[in-house]
Amino acid sequence: MTSSPHMTGNGPGGSGLLQTLPGSDSQLDARHLRCPMPLLKTRQALRALAPGQTLLVRATDVGARRDIPAYLRQSGHELVRSSDPATETDDEIWFLIRVVDNDAETDAEGDN
């Protein structure tokens, strides 16, 4: 998988905050992006992963708290965990997502 400045594999190093986040196969840094970009980048990143792999999405846009879970319910991808609003730092939220068969996502999009 090719990485971009905003999507990296889970490796050693990084900030102290990263060490407190759950482990994942890939990470998407959507912090400081405005709606609808966190959702669009999440969809793009999920398509690049194989079923069973996990994606950790970090965002600061308040709309992501509503938009990403709603998209996951529609697409069938699994929301494994998300940040607790009481423990967010600097208004950052995160989502740990497990990829399902990407064909199911295509089927869900066709239902619109």
Image (spheres, helix red, strand yellow):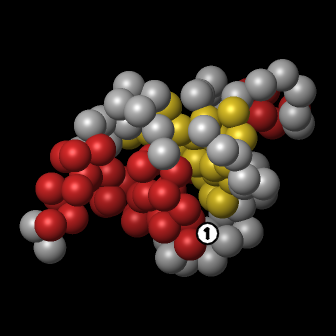
| Residue furthest to the front | 2
Q: Is residue 1 left or right of residue 89?
A: left
* Residue occupying the point 48% across, 65% down: 39
Rendered location of residue 46, percent (x, y): 45, 47
What's the amino acid at mark 1?
Answer: Asp
In the picture of the structure, the residue carrying the numbered disc 1 is 61
Total number of numbered discs in the rendering: 1
Question: Quadrant of residue 91 in the image?
Answer: bottom right
Q: Quadrant of the N terminus?
A: top right
Asked if residue 35 is positioned above or below residue 39 in the image, the reply reads below
Pick whichever, 84 or 100, lies toward us.
Answer: 100
Question: Quadrant of residue 71 in the image?
Answer: bottom left
Rendered location of residue 77, percent (x, y): 31, 42
From where the camera sits, is residue 83 visible?
A: no
* Residue occupying the point 69% across, 33% down: 9
From where the camera sits, is residue 44 visible?
A: yes
Q: Is residue 65 left or right of residue 4?
A: left
How packed mark 1 is, by other alpha carbons closer than 10 Å (few <14, some 14-19, many 20 or more), is: some
Rendered location of residue 40, percent (x, y): 48, 67
Secondary structure beneath label 1? loop
Rendered location of residue 47, percent (x, y): 42, 49
* Residue occupying the point 66% across, 44% down: 2
